[in-house]
Amino acid sequence: MKKFKEDLVSSALEFKKLRVLCVLAVMGALAVALEGVASIRITPNIKIGFSGYPNQVVDLLFGPVTGGVFGAVMDVLKFFLIPTGYPFHPGYTLDAALAAFIYGCFYYRRPVRLWRILAAKGIVALFVNVGLATYWQTSTFGQGFWALFPGRALKNLIMWPIESGIFYVIAKGLESAGAFRLLDRK
């Protein structure tokens, strides 16, 4: 528990560093660009996108507090910069912050391991993407939870190992390139 508290404080203090703010700006721009050009809407309720990877890099590098704030801010920014025609719902912003917080708890100042990424992605997929996000969709669009649940669960089950593998490759690539050393990480 002491390590967890230390990580939360350390993550919150990341905002005081200029180089962290610069990396956040670059990752934010990359996330917006990927949202605009690399998102595939399968159905009105199911989308596959790649804008979450810059967010996960932020969670890895700067922890759960910085990641959670970044995730929430990026959710709102992407809503206004790349309108989809769907109404704004603060529940999705909460989802973005919660997912980033969870990823940050698993990744921050810890070795990059596939099992860790699979565990974090599995928890986010189950509780945030399938549970909470499906609930928000029911309140936004008036559709039944159980009508949306199977498609969202199947999509997340299929994408779980794929997205975990992609992020593992990204994280290992950053580690090999020395990005963690440049930012005073292990």
Image: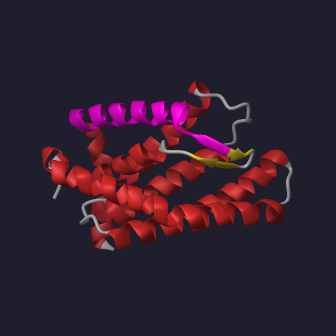
Q: Classify residue 19 as left or right of residue 130.
A: left
Marker count (numbered): 0
Q: Quadrant of residue 157?
A: bottom right
Residue 13 placement (x, y as % from top left): 28, 46
Looking at this view, is 79 or 2 the one in front? 79
Residue segment shown in magenta = 18-41
**In the rendered image, which quarter contains the N terminus?**
bottom left
Query: Residue 92 location in percent, x, y?
Result: 63, 47
**Which of the 4 image quarters holds residue 133?**
bottom right
Q: Residue at x 75, y 51 (%)?
A: 137
Q: In this view, does 100 lie to the left or right of 134?
A: left
Looking at the picture, tell me which residue is in the foreground, 29 or 39.
Answer: 39
Residue 74, placed above or below residue 181: above
Q: Does the magenta segment cover residue 58?
A: no
> Along the horizontal axis of the image, is 1 left or right of 182?
right
Tell me residue 14's x, y (percent): 27, 45
Q: Residue at x 73, y 35 (%)?
A: 86
* Residue ID at (34%, 32%): 26
- Residue shown at 33% from the left, 61% from the top: 107
Residue 146 is left or right of residue 63, and the answer is right
Residue 55: x %, y % from top left: 42, 46
Residue 40 within the segment the image draws in magenta: yes
Question: Relative to the observer, which residue lies in front, 118 or 55?
Answer: 118
